[in-house]
């Protein structure tokens, strides 16, 4: 890993905070020590090929490596964290390089070749020990540990909700990489590239493989943009201008960005006006984000604003308030306004206001909302309102009692463009927010 003195200093402070928060979680849930497994590589069925490795986020919270499968972290209050780094002897595959850099001084680091060496290097059990990670026959054989206890997990998840300065710095860098990818992707789109070609342009500009990304990018031309998690990549060039919805992020030290942009086929047309209206709407919502903001209320406000935009575009013949109250706005905006972001794209802690509190349900009629609590300083959230023309939902609306409140001729003209989503990543502050996405695009000259 390259030397980053400023980031190393932030990471040292981050580790002190993580250690303090973990000790708090252990004490509150009645545990004396913690084992955190980095994760395993999974073989495909009847094959010797593995799926792309995804590290345990609880491991990466401590250790800034995403290429260390089968490693183990031992944490016990009053002791230096022990990192048992799996470094097998192998000539079929290149083993991960041994950790180096300033961050390693904060750990007792022991390279181990196999599970037998790992178990031998573990200290004697110190009271009640928890294990966080994917259980395997080997970990089950450890004995005397409790695997993924729910109470401890809820405490640890709550500790991850508010990001340290180090984590935000990593998310800034992930945003910078993704912004470069989006700029290249838009250029490929304008040049008439296929979905696959746009995807490849994004990867090249990010400097990352698809398996390095925080999630599989959504590259959707035309009507494909109506599928919220569109997973195909058409290799055929479209032959004519089409709209584009691209939802793609990048990673840095395990932390991800999550950015969406939408582009019309023809600047100045009916759909482009809707895209520009969504851009203004999304920025107005970003301006409301600060400590204390009640996210479900903001989600409902977004529905009112989207309904108003659809009314202005001639899609709806009903007042915005009535469109939201009747559920008609959900036909065009069926997902949540946003979610927490960090070591996981849909990061943990979005439903519990406190580790020992019951989950807060989403508003009635809005089951897809992934964040139901008030915002706190240090949270990182996505802001992603959208408008979509989804056949499944439109067909149900056409058959329902609200059908007269929709201009179906306008809908039929717009359906070919699929949908619109504008998504930024925001760091919640006391009086406002830092927009990581807009800053990254500005730095990229876009």
Image (spheres, rainbow, N blue to C red):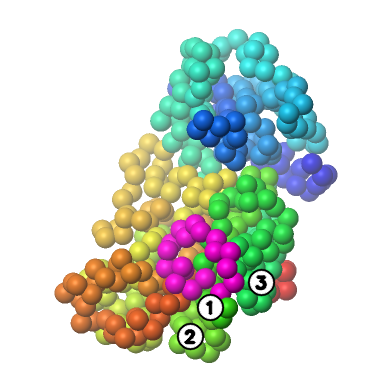
How far, Cα to Cα, is label 3 from label 1? 12 Å
- Closest to the observer, 170 or 288: 170
Q: Considering the numbered disc 1 on the image, is that residue within a helix, a strand or a loop? A: loop
Residue under the image location 71 percent in, 41 percent down: 11
The residue identified by callout 2 is 273
**Mark 3 or 2, closer to the camera:** 3
**Residue 86 numbered tag:** none
- Closest to the observer, 379 or 430: 379
- How many circles with numbers are drawn on the protein? 3
Quadrant where the C terminus sits is bottom right
Q: Residues within 10 Å of mark 1 (few under 14, many from 20)?
A: some
- The answer to which of marks 3 and 1 sits earlier in the sequence is 3
When asked about the image quadrant of residue 330, the answer is bottom left
Question: Is any atom of residue 277 visible in this view?
Answer: no
Identify the magenta region.
221-238
The residue identified by callout 1 is 242
Q: Label 2 near label 1: C-beta < 8 Å?
A: no
Where residue 291 appears, as percent x and y from the top left, is: 49, 58
The residue identified by callout 3 is 188
Q: Considering the numbered disc 2 on the image, is that residue within a helix, a strand or a loop? A: helix
- The answer to which of marks 1 and 2 sits earlier in the sequence is 1
Where residue 248 appears, as percent x and y from the top left, is: 58, 60
Residue under the image location 54 percent in, 85 percent down: 266
How far, Cα to Cα, is label 3 from label 2? 22 Å
**Mark 1 or 2, closer to the camera:** 1
- The answer to which of marks 3 and 2 sits earlier in the sequence is 3
Q: Main secondary structure of the magenta part?
A: loop
- Position of 413 compared to 51: left or right? left
The correct choice, above or below, for 9 with respect to 337 in the image is above
């Amino acid at each position: 890993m390259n030397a980053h003195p400023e980031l190393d200093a932030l990471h040292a402070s981050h580790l002190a905070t993580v250690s303090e928060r973990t000790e708090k979680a252990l004490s509150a849930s009645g545990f004396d020590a913690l084992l955190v497994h980095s994760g395993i590589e999974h073989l495909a069925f009847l094959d010797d090929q593995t799926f792309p490795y995804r590290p345990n986020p609880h491991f990466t919270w401590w250790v800034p490596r995403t290429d260390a499968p089968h490693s183990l972290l031992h944490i016990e209050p009053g002791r230096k964290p022990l990192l048992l780094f799996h470094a097998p002897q192998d000539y079929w595959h290149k083993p991960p390089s041994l950790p180096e850099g300033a961050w390693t001084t904060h750990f007792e680091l022991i390279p181990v070749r196999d599970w037998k060496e790992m178990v031998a290097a573990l200290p004697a059990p110190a009271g009640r020990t928890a294990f966080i990670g994917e259980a395997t026959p080997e970990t089950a054989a450890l004995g005397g540990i409790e695997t993924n206890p729910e109470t401890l997990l809820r405490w640890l998840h709550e500790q991850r909700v508010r990001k340290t300065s180090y984590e935000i710095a990593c998310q800034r860098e992930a945003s910078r990489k993704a912004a470069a990818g989006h700029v290249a992707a838009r250029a490929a789109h304008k040049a008439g590239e296929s979905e696959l070609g746009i995807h490849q342009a994004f990867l090249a500009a990010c400097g990352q493989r698809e398996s390095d990304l925080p999630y599989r990018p959504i590259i959707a031309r035309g009507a494909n943009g109506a599928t919220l998690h569109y997973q195909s990549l058409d290799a055929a060039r479209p032959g004519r201008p089409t709209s584009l919805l691209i939802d793609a992020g990048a990673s840095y030290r395990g932390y991800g960005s999550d950015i969406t942009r939408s582009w019309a086929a023809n600047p100045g047309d009916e759909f482009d006006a809707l895209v520009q209206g969504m851009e203004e709407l999304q920025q107005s919502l970003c301006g409301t984000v600060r400590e204390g903001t009640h996210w479900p209320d903001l989600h409902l406000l977004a529905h009112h604003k989207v309904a108003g935009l659809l009314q202005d575009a001639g899609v709806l013949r009903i007042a915005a308030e009535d469109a939201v109250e009747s559920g008609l706005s959900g036909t065009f905006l069926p997902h949540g306004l946003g979610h927490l972001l960090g070591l996981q794209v849909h990061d943990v802690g979005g439903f519990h206001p406190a580790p020992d509190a019951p989950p807060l349900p989403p508003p009635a009629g809005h089951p897809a909302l992934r964040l139901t609590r008030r915002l706190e300083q240090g949270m990182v959230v996505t802001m992603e309102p959208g408008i979509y023309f989804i056949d499944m939902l439109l067909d149900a609306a056409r058959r329902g009692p609200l059908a007269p409140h929709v201009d179906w001729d306008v809908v039929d003209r717009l359906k070919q463009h699929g949908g619109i989503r504008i998504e930024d990543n925001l760091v919640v502050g006391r009086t406002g927010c830092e927009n990581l996405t807009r800053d990254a695009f500005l730095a990229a000259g876009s």
